[in-house]
């Protein structure tokens, strides 16, 4: 909540929060609602958005759609892991995107500047986004805009 206060003092208007590694306490959803946050991209329990009992919109995420799970490379495990080619990650994301779009589900991927920010990976991301935007039946929007859309009839969860 201190971070939210600091951001608002800097005229930023956060509308949602993703907990570090998608790990949060039972009370955090009520705190987010109390402080006016609209959405939570934290749970991996579904492929469709839903509303928590307090009105916060849950935008389900998946490890397979997180760039860190593919590109993370750190000292303790670096000798046991290969860094995948960007094309392999794109192939995986494309497969997941096509399957989720056929189901009318949410495709929410997570990217971090320190992982996706390499030239070949940015080119892959541009190429992948071109594929996504070529589908006329896809609504490409921000999490904040999605969560604030008043005409969404989302199932109640939790």
Image (cartoon, helix red, strand yellow):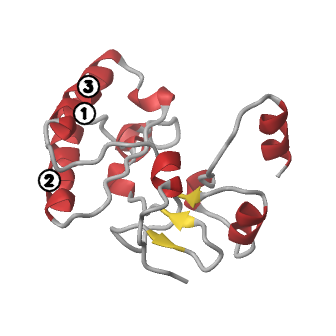
| Mark 1 vs 3: CB contact within 8 A | yes
Q: Secondary structure at mark 1?
A: helix
Instruction: Examine the image and state in which quarter residue 24 appears.
Output: bottom right
To which residue does mark 2 refer? 98
| Mark 3 vs 2: CB contact within 8 A | no
Quarter containing the C terminus: bottom right
To which residue does mark 3 refer? 126
> What residue is rendered at 63% in x and 48% in y?
15
To which residue does mark 1 refer? 129
Is 149 on the left or on the right of 88, as rendered? right
Q: CA distance from mark 1 to mark 3?
A: 5 Å
Is residue 85 in view from this perspective? no
Q: Is residue 158 above or below residue 152?
A: below
Q: CA distance from mark 1 to mark 2?
A: 13 Å
Who is closer to the viewer here, 19 or 5?
5
Q: Is residue 156 above or below residue 85?
A: below
Task: Decide which of tag 1 and tag 2 comes sooner along the chain.
Answer: 2
């Amino acid at each position: 909540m201190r971070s939210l206060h600091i951001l608002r003092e800097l005229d930023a208007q956060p509308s949602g929060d993703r907990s570090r590694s998608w790990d949060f306490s039972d009370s955090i959803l009520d705190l987010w609602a109390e402080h006016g946050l609209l959405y939570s991209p934290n749970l991996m329990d579904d492929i469709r958005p839903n509303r928590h009992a307090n009105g916060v919109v849950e935008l389900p995420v998946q490890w397979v759609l997180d760039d860190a799970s593919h590109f993370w490379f750190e000292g303790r495990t670096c000798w046991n892991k290969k860094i995948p080619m960007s094309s392999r990650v794109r192939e995986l994301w494309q497969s997941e995107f096509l399957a989720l779009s056929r189901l009318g589900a949410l495709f929410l991927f997570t990217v971090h500047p320190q992982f996706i920010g390499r030239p070949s990976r940015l080119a892959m991301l541009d190429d992948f986004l071109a594929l996504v935007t070529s589908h006329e039946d896809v609504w490409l929007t921000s999490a904040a805009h999605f969560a604030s859309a008043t005409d969404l009839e989302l199932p109640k969860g939790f």
